[in-house]
Image (spheres, rainbow, N blue to C red):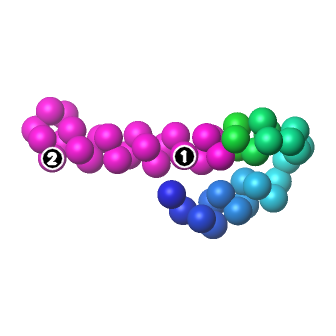
Amino acid sequence: MKRSALAQLDAVGDDHGALGFWMRYNAVKQPVVREIYERMFRAAGLA
């Protein structure tokens, strides 16, 4: 995950405590995880 993207996301928006942090964290993490899975499936010839 790109730390700069997480830092930007953490600095912007309403803060709802820990729940708000994790929702923002997951919003950054999701596309990264999808990209990793896509590369893994392509490398295995499954995509």
Out of 25 and 8, give the one closest to the viewer.
25
As drawn, the residue found furthest toward the top would be 46
Few, some or many residues within 10 Å of mark 2 (<14, 14–19, 20+): few
Few, some or many residues within 10 Å of mark 1 (<14, 14–19, 20+): some
Residue 43 is a magenta residue:
yes
Q: Position of residue 3 (x, y in %)?
A: 59, 65
Q: Is residue 12 left or right of residue 40?
A: right
- State the quadrant of the C terminus: top left
Out of 15 and 5, give the one closest to the viewer.
15
Q: Which type of secondary structure does the marked residue at label 2 adopt?
A: helix
Residue 5 versus residue 34 in the image, above or below: below
Magenta segment, prevailing SS (helix, strand or loop): helix
Residue 43, numbered label? 2
Q: Position of residue 14 (x, y in %)?
A: 89, 43
Q: Position of residue 39 (x, y in %)?
A: 26, 47
At 49% from the left and 43% from the top, the residue drawn is 31
Residue 29, numbered label? 1
* Residue type at tag 1: Lys
* Residue type at tag 2: Ala
Residue 5, numbered label? none
How many callouts does the rendering have?
2
In the rendered image, which quarter is residue 21 located in?
top right
At 62% from the left and 41% from the top, the residue drawn is 27
Residue 1 versus residue 17 in the image, above or below: below
At 86% from the left and 42% from the top, the residue drawn is 17
Residues under numbered marks 1 and 2 in contact, where contact means CB atoms less than 8 Å apart: no
As drawn, the residue found furthest toward the left would be 45
In space, the residues marked 1 and 2 are separated at their CA atoms by 21 Å
Residue range in magenta is 25-47
